[in-house]
Amino acid sequence: MNWSHFQEKLIPAGYSESDQEFIRSAFEFAQKAHEGQKRASGDPYFSHVFEVASNIALLRLDARTIAAALLHDTIEDCNITQADIANKFGKEVATLVEGVTKLDKIRYQGVQRNVESIRKMVLATAEDVRVVLLKLMDRLHNMQTIAHLPEDKQKRIARETLELYAPLAYRLGIGELKGTLQDLAFPVMYPEEAKWIKEQVETRVPEGRKYLEEEIKPFIEDTLLKDNVQPVAIDFRAKHHYSLWQKLLRSDMDFGRVSDLLAVRVIVRSIEDCYKTLGIIHQLWKPVPGRIKDYIALPKPNGYRSLHTTVFCEENRITEFQIRTPQMHEEAEYGIAAHWAYEESGKPKSGARARPQQLSWVRRLPEWHQEIGNSSDGEEFLESLKIDFFKDRIFVLSPKGEVFDLPEGATPVDFAYHIHTEVGNHMAGAKVNGKMVQFTHKLISGDAVEILTQKNKKPAPDWLTHVKTSLARGHIRAALRKDAELAQHAAHGKQREKCEVHIVSKNRVGLLKDISAVFDFYRISMQNVSMSTHNKTYPAITVTFQARDHKQIERLVTRLKTIENVEQITVKNPG
Ligand code: MN
């Protein structure tokens, strides 16, 4: 696993000297960062990074993506920050690595109704399609080495691969990768079925391959050449096990109804030759009605192009043919990655970002939702259209890895109320990606949000001005209303508390009447009035009463002091 081994993979793809130097620095940086780390298999951790980056090189992605592949696990596992990577390898590489790190935080729960939003989240979080490609290659190697993990972990990862990553690979047009991922997950998820399919394939395919190789291939080669069509290659494609099983499930487990267990793939130079080849095949053998598919004129939503036909071949054996050009073949193998691939000259395309293709891919997303959304109902599909390709939605994570779908501009307060009303009502603080943030902080897709709560915390009225969701707003209003009612109750409670006022005054006629007039003025009822006549000239009058609050008592006392002959007033408030 030294540099020269890796370089061997770069040279055939035609990476320039300077690209190779750049990749080399990332290679050495990652090798050092993972030094001493081991995988579950006992292999050095770097072997994983090496394989992922090799596969990225196989897709012939740009040098920065290869560097990102080499560095993809350094942030998580090696105390290296995004800033370190940005300083050494530039912002673009750092963004790609950060994207993969963010995707790793998505914990797939396998809850059916969540699948759709997780798929959306993966796409929205990735932002750059290259991040999804990196994640797919990471997953591919993890699936290849899954046997070393405990069984429950194997099941979780396999399920996630079948339901989340294989459909993503298909969507990116990387049909081969989709099939490979499914076939790796198949025996983990359905051991018995996978074993049965494997046995069936092992008994059926070799004989079929022999027949095609010996009888059909030479025959068709000759005929094409006679008609001036130069075949680039004629080979055979065996159906992937998982997709074969899926097809059998739809065909009452009847192998007789699966005609493409093995298909003949004819690669010719031009589109014109494709149609010519189709005509030649149909002249040789009778086509099965309804099985001719022109994916050149009408490509599949993921961009797949080819001509397919199924014919009654020699000995009446039903055989499928796939006809395509080398470019179509490349696109079928590499999918969207083919658009980043090097031009024929061996030099990378300028800009390497291939914006137009990326956009056309995004435009096809609704079709994708339709295709893979069999499990989700029509309403969900409409919902996914409504969000206008995530432009006004964000997807954030709880500490448990659950995905929350919020409108753009949503704050931690919105998030808190989406977790639980009580979490919102007692929110004391928020952490985003491990750092404390303000309540007004605007969340973005991929943020991991943690809400801190305290029993005595309550919503503040100003929260209403910065929350985005009606859910949060409604709960805050309800909490504020409840709080105001409680405050009123508390005030009522105080009123019931007894106060005593002692008034020392020179005795005179009408003194008590004047005092009670002051109490009347403040609408305070005197509950008990007593007069101590210990000193007959200066009697002490004690009045017990209930006041609303302290201010009311102050006002009362001030006014009592204005009564003629009153010398001294003291208040005792037992509350
Ligand atoms: Mn990894």
Image (spheres, grey):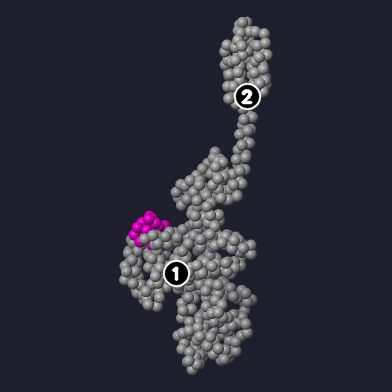
- In three-dimensional space, the C-alpha distance between marks 2 and 1, rounded to whole angstroms, equals 77 Å
Specify the segment rendered in magenta.
71-89
Q: Is mark 2 on a helix, strand or loop?
A: loop
Query: Considering depth in this image, is 317 or 395 the residue closer to the camera?
Result: 395
Say whether residue 30 is left or right of residue 312: left
Residue 271 lies, in percent from the top left, at 50, 83
Instruction: Specify the label residue 354 is tagged with.
Output: 1
Amino acid at dot 1: Ala
Query: Mark 2 sits on what residue?
Result: 547
The residue located at (64%, 29%) in the rendering is: 492
Q: Where residue 77 sits in the image (x, y, percent)?
A: 40, 57
Residue 79 counted in the magenta span: yes
From the viewer's perspective, is residue 315 above or below residue 249? below
Instruction: Name the spot of residue 458 as percent of width and height, x first.
Output: 56, 40
Q: Does the image show residue 34?
A: no
* Residue 7 colored in magenta in the image: no
523 in relation to 289, above or below: above
Q: Is residue 488 visible?
A: yes
Quadrant of picture, ligand 1: bottom left
User: Which quadrant: the N terminus?
Assistant: bottom left
